[in-house]
Image: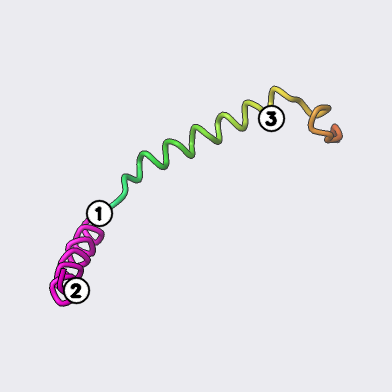
Amino acid sequence: MNADIHMLLHADRSAELRREARSFTPPRTALRTRVGWTMVELGLRLARSGPAAAGAHTFRTA
């Protein structure tokens, strides 16, 4: 392939990819949902393990 033709095809494809990238917006709700459920799962694991398994001390109030 001629180098000039190769460069023209490359420039055309890169411009097309840049247009697609500008118009793309990632779905925020999916990420928010995954992070939320991950936090719930982590909280449940911590609650199940208890303070003795985590090596924490019990704190007294008043």
Residue drawn 31% across and 45% down? Answer: 27
Q: Residues within 10 Å of mark 3 (few under 14, many from 20)?
A: few
Residue 20 picture location, percent across and down = 20, 58
In which quarter of the view is residue 53 placed? top right
Q: Which residue occupies the extreme bottom position in the image?
A: 4
Whether residue 60 is visible to the viewer of this picture, yes or no, is no
User: Which residue is under mark 2?
Assistant: 7
For the residues marked 3 and 1, what is the alpha-carbon distance in whole angstroms? 37 Å
Who is closer to the viewer here, 42 or 11?
Answer: 11
Disc 3 vs disc 2: Cβ atoms closer than 8 Å? Answer: no
Q: CA distance from mark 1 to mark 2?
A: 26 Å
Residue kind at label 1, given as amino acid type: Phe
Residue 48 in sight? yes
Q: Is residue 37 left or right of residue 57?
A: left
Q: Are marks 3 and 1 in contact (CB under 8 Å)?
A: no
Asked whether 4 or 21 is in front, the reply is 4
Q: Earlier in the sequence, mark 1 or mark 2?
A: 2
Q: Quadrant of the C terminus?
A: top right
Q: Would you name the residue on which mark 1 appears?
A: 24
Disc 3 secondary structure class: helix
Q: Position of residue 59 (x, y in %)?
A: 84, 35
Tell whether position 19 is magenta. Answer: yes
Q: Which mark is residue 46?
A: 3
> Relative to 21, is 3 above or below?
below
Front disc: 3 or 1: 1
Residue in the image at 49% along x and 32% along y: 37
Q: Amino acid at mark 2?
A: Met
> Residue 18, image x and y in percent?
23, 64
Percent x, y of residue 60: 86, 34
The residue carrying pointer 1 sits among few (fewer than 14), some (14 to 19) or many (20 or more) residues within 10 Å by Cα, namely few
Label 3 to label 2: alpha-carbon separation: 56 Å
